[in-house]
Image: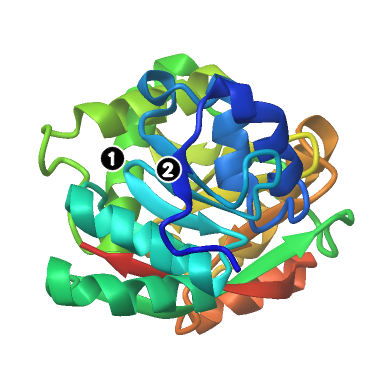
Amino acid sequence: MLRTSASRVLDDNDRDEVLALLDTDPVANVFVASRVRTVGLNPSRLGGQMWGFGPRGGLVSLCYSGANLVPVNATRDAVHAFADRARKQGRRCSSIVGPAGAVERMWERLEPHWGSARAIRWAQPVMATGSAPAVEPDPLVRRVRPEEFGILLPACVAMFTEEVGVSPDNGDGGALYRSRVAELIRIGRSYARIEDGKVVFKAEIGAVTPQACQIQGVWVHPDHRGRGHAVAGMAAVVEQALKYFAPLVTLYVNDFNVSARAAYRKVGFREVDTFMSVLF
């Protein structure tokens, strides 16, 4: 039987094995797989560490430890090993996020040492589609241009604050968040409907692999809610995502956000998994 201490920090020599494991569930693992495919496993480029569990040459579980702590295909023994490693190094992440069962077990072991979380999202349905949108896309939703950064940023900050409960300006004054917003615009993965210099609808494609991509940051200006912008806007983004990025489009949403879940279902998304997030 594998011992709970059988975890190790991985490096670029493990890349092929790591990607093979990540590719067994391209929807659930799209965020971590996108990071590994883009920058590899060197901690200085990855922005954290990748922990592996299992015999060398036979990884069975992973855990990305960076700004987020993300268990991947984590068996019960792997969860124990990853939680022990996280406990020993101290909390460095702003959240634990991933498949609900693994995150719940990890948090059970970490809470006595890390203290209370700021918020816990116990059930976040993971939704996916590989089909053309079931509704007409909004023709005014398009890629955001670099010169529109100043228009988009306030909408991104409002979305983040509304969704997470804190401002992205906390900590480093928002420098890292602004850099990420600008990067997504630069690489053509930021979409919005902009009218009279203001964002009506926006969303980003935050992670991309050859198998799947993940939509994030969906937001409709409060003055324009209830008018169908979320449905038509998401249809436009899905259309673009399937055309330019990957054959599967995915996202995850809070279970209590009934209106968002209904909008995504109208576009053609279906629920395929459940995530959980612990926010600090």
Q: Quadrant of residue 174?
A: top left
Q: Residue at x 12, y 72 (%)?
A: 115
Q: Mark 1: few, some, or many residues within 10 Å (few <14, many ≥20)?
A: few
Comparing 120 with 3, the one in front is 3
Q: Amino acid at mark 2?
A: Val
Percent x, y of residue 37: 64, 27
Q: Upstream in the sequence, badge 1 or badge 2?
A: 1
Marks 1/2 in contact by CB < 8 Å: the verdict is yes
Comparing 268 with 68, the one in front is 68
Q: Which quadrant of the figure contains the C terminus?
A: bottom left
Q: Mark 2: few, some, or many residues within 10 Å (few <14, many ≥20)?
A: many
Secondary element under disc 2, as helix, strand or loop, is strand
Q: Which residue is mark 1?
A: 154
Q: Is residue 258 above or below residue 3?
A: below
Q: Is residue 139 visible?
A: yes
Q: Amino acid at mark 1?
A: Pro
Q: Is residue 26 above or below residue 141?
A: below
Identify the mark at residue 214; answer none if there is no mark.
Answer: none
Of tags 1 and 2, the one toward the viewer is 1
Percent x, y of residue 269: 75, 67
Side (left or right) of 71 relative to 138: left
Q: Which residue is mark 2?
A: 199
Q: Is residue 142 visible?
A: no
Q: Residue at x 33, y 24 (%)?
A: 179
Side (left or right) of 18 relative to 173: right
Q: Is residue 57 above or below residue 250?
A: above
